[in-house]
Image (spheres, rainbow, N blue to C red):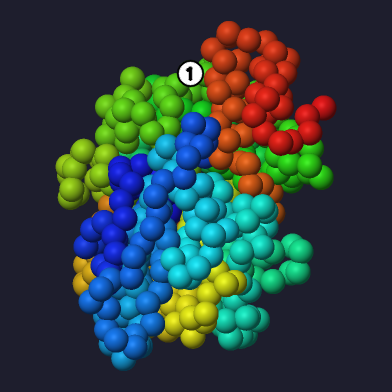
Amino acid sequence: MKKLVASALCVCMMTGMLAGCGDTAQPATDTPADQPADTTADKPADTTADTPADAPAGDVTLNVWAFTDEVPNMVQKYIDTHPDCGFNFTSTIIATTDGAYQPALDQALAAGGADAPDIYAAESAFVLKYTQGDASQYAMPYEDLGIDVAAELKAADIAQYTVDIGTRPSDGKLVGLGYQATGGVFIYRRSIAKDVWGTDDPKTVAEKIGAGTNSWDTFFSAAAELKAKGYGIVSGDGDIWHAVENSSDKGWIVDGKLTIDPKREAFLDLSKQLKDNKYHNDTQDWSDAWFADMKGEGAQGILGFFGPAWLINYTLAPNCGGEKVGEGTYGDWACCEPPIGFFWGGTWVLANKATTKTDAVKQIIDWITLDCTENGLQYMWANGTFNGEGGTKDCVASGTVMSMSNGTLDFLGGQDMFEAFVPANQYANGKNLTQYDETINGYWREQVREYTAGNKTREAAIADFKQNVADNLDVTVE
């Protein structure tokens, strides 16, 4: 989960039995994948996390590394609910802003020793580096921790895309899993749907936008209908990008060479179609104008946004202009199946192969990623009970847990969001990621905007995109 919380965090390091920078566990939201990685951070930050002097004698002390306080808070929760577990932990939290987290983590993994991470987190924008890429050799397979991987995956009914992303190709071993499911749906304004189509029923709206067609044709027909009534279908082209990106057949890198999948290349045309027909407000994601459209305060009313559950909880809700039904757009939302299956964001939890604390690491990782009982992290997360009753409900990786949980939200007009998100998690594809996605997506989105603004021809935009990749990454470009 990713960048709204994470981008607000400054680099922070906390030691002792604290769980991070705050007392509450809020899912972090992924760094917008269209923002290029910061290449100026060539000097890793000081990441030493000293074992607390007051650690109980004889207790095992785990070193936990993360980019927000989310995973450390989970470790603290496990200790609080399992007082006889026999271990404590230190946490090192370095935000992904300014590109600081990865260099520091890489240095700590390579250096080894007593201060090396025992458990570390990686988000979707760069997780492939740690599960399948340049740093995957540091990860310990879950089965080496003593976890019965096959049996527990089956029992928990873990979303397949999270398993695919966490599996190391060199040996076929599972080395990382997430706890949150980030399959995407279409999140729309009920009042706008009623005005244009006479109903806000999710099944009807899903049909109107071409749900399950794996095509954008019906979606653009709906955009024309909305435009005739004075509405846009999305806020900006970024609102369809993640669906385009994660539904492609191939990732950016194939056999070491830059590859532009036809579905990703088609984003040039889709983006231009949105702009030329004024089907959106031409905003950029994470901008003030994008947030204004969530309040209904943009140039034209916007039907909806594509995204996972965290987009509802940590982006739409805080920016809707209210905190209860009747205020701003609060309660005027619903969600339905999208035209294209996709996912956006997520955090994967890994173990260091060099750890000597395998029993403690196993307890934590199993509880966070595979425990599908009412005592596991995912049940608390799904039902909003992590910090007591009445907390934020979220989608989790375990289908078993989701089937046991209640996803009804006032924000969604009383809709049970799990009805839309459970199938969405199954549609998501985790086989088209690369370890360079964060950077390459940024280059691509920039050139698409140049093209749709009329500053470059289609051919020039593609050529400049290729040149940026060739100049900045160790990738063959033809």
Residue at coordinates 27% horizontally, 27% vertically from top-left? 297
Q: Does residue 86 appear in the picture of this structure?
A: yes
**On-image quarter of the N terminus:** bottom left
Can residue 181 be seen in the rendering of this structure? no
Where residue 325 sits: x, y (%)? 19, 49
- Nearest the camera: 65 or 197? 65
Quadrant of res 142: bottom right
Residue under the image location 70 percent in, 13 percent down? 460
**Circle 1 is placed at which residue position?**
278
Question: Measured from the top left, where is residue 184 in percent x and y?
Answer: 51, 51
Residue depicted at 66% across the width and 63% down the height:
137
- The residue positioned 61% from the left and 28% from the top of the image is 444
At label 1, counting other C-alpha atoms closer than 10 Å, the crowd grade (few under 14, some 14-19, many 20 or more) is some
**Residue 82, above or below 420:** below
Q: Check disc 1 and give the amino acid type.
A: Lys
The residue closer to the viewer here, 200 or 64, is 64
Residue 76 is left or right of residue 390, and the answer is right
Q: How many marks?
A: 1
Which quadrant of the figure has residue 140? bottom right
In the picture, which quadrant includes the C terminus? top right
- Picture coordinates of residue 285 (x, y %)? 42, 32
Q: Nearer the viewer, residue 246 or 230?
A: 246
| Image: 375 above or below 419 | below
